[in-house]
């Protein structure tokens, strides 16, 4: 495998990251809602980014309001996964237990609370399951 001097892959507990202005890009794919303390994770990622750095977060495309998900083609599956896996992972650590269907509204609120200035939510035409949130510090 070739060595890349400008890329580093790190596995770390994001609630205890303790790095400041260290990264140009941080990615998170379908994991923030599973965390014990998602707000702390978002704050740690914000702190770890350099000014102008980007955070790409893929998360479930659903509403925070159950009645708005009744017509979602994957609604029953999403709620099943959310309660049987995602919430359980978080609650087992005495966490917030948001689950996969925490929804777009709560996700936006949490990103704003973490101080991200520029937040764009992108979708892919072929992907009915996910939102791709691009945030800049």
Image (spheres, rainbow, N blue to C red):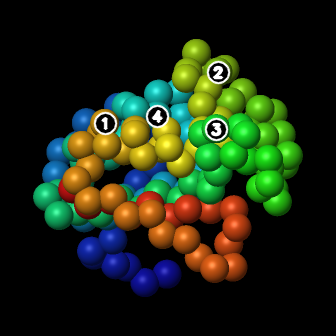
Circle 2 sits on which residue? 91
Circle 3 sits on which residue? 65
Circle 4 sits on which residue? 38
Q: x%, y% of residue 130?
A: 62, 62
Element under disc 1 = helix
Q: Nearer the viewer, residue 101 or 23?
A: 101
Q: x%, y% of residue 57?
A: 46, 57
Q: Which residue is drawn at the image coordinates 40% and 38% (left, top)?
A: 110
Q: Which residue is drawn at the image coordinates 54% and 34% (left, top)?
A: 35
Q: Which residue is drawn at the image coordinates 41% and 54% (left, top)?
A: 10
Q: x%, y% of residue 62?
A: 64, 51
Decide if residue 39 is on the left or right side of residue 89: left
Q: Residue furthest bottom?
A: 2
Q: CA distance from mark 3 to mark 2?
A: 21 Å
Q: Nearer the viewer, mark 3 or mark 2?
A: 3
Q: Nearer the viewer, mark 1 or mark 2?
A: 1
Check if mark 1's residue and mark 2's residue have beta carbons within 8 Å: no
Please tell me which of labels 1 and 3 falls first in the chain: 3
Element under disc 4 = helix
Q: Quadrant of the C terminus?
A: bottom left
**Can the viewer see residue 122 in this picture?**
yes
In the picture, residue 23 is in which quadrant?
Answer: bottom left
Q: CA distance from mark 1 to mark 2?
A: 22 Å
Decide if residue 58 is on the left or right side of residue 9: right
Circle 1 sits on which residue? 113
**Can the viewer see residue 15 in this picture?**
no
In the picture, residue 101 is in which quadrant?
Answer: top right
């Amino acid at each position: 495998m070739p060595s890349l001097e400008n890329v580093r892959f790190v596995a770390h507990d994001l609630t205890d990251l303790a790095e400041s202005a260290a990264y140009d890009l941080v990615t998170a794919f379908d994991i923030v809602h599973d965390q014990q303390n998602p707000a702390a994770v978002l704050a740690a990622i914000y702190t770890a980014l350099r000014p102008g750095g980007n955070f790409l977060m893929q998360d479930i495309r659903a509403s925070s309001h159950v009645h708005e998900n009744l017509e979602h083609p994957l609604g029953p599956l999403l709620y099943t996964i959310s309660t049987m896996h995602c919430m359980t992972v978080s609650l087992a650590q005495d966490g917030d237990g948001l689950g996969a269907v925490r929804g777009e509204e709560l996700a936006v609120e949490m990103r704003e609370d973490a101080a991200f200035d520029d937040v764009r939510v992108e979708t892919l035409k072929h992907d009915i399951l996910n939102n791709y949130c691009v945030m800049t510090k």
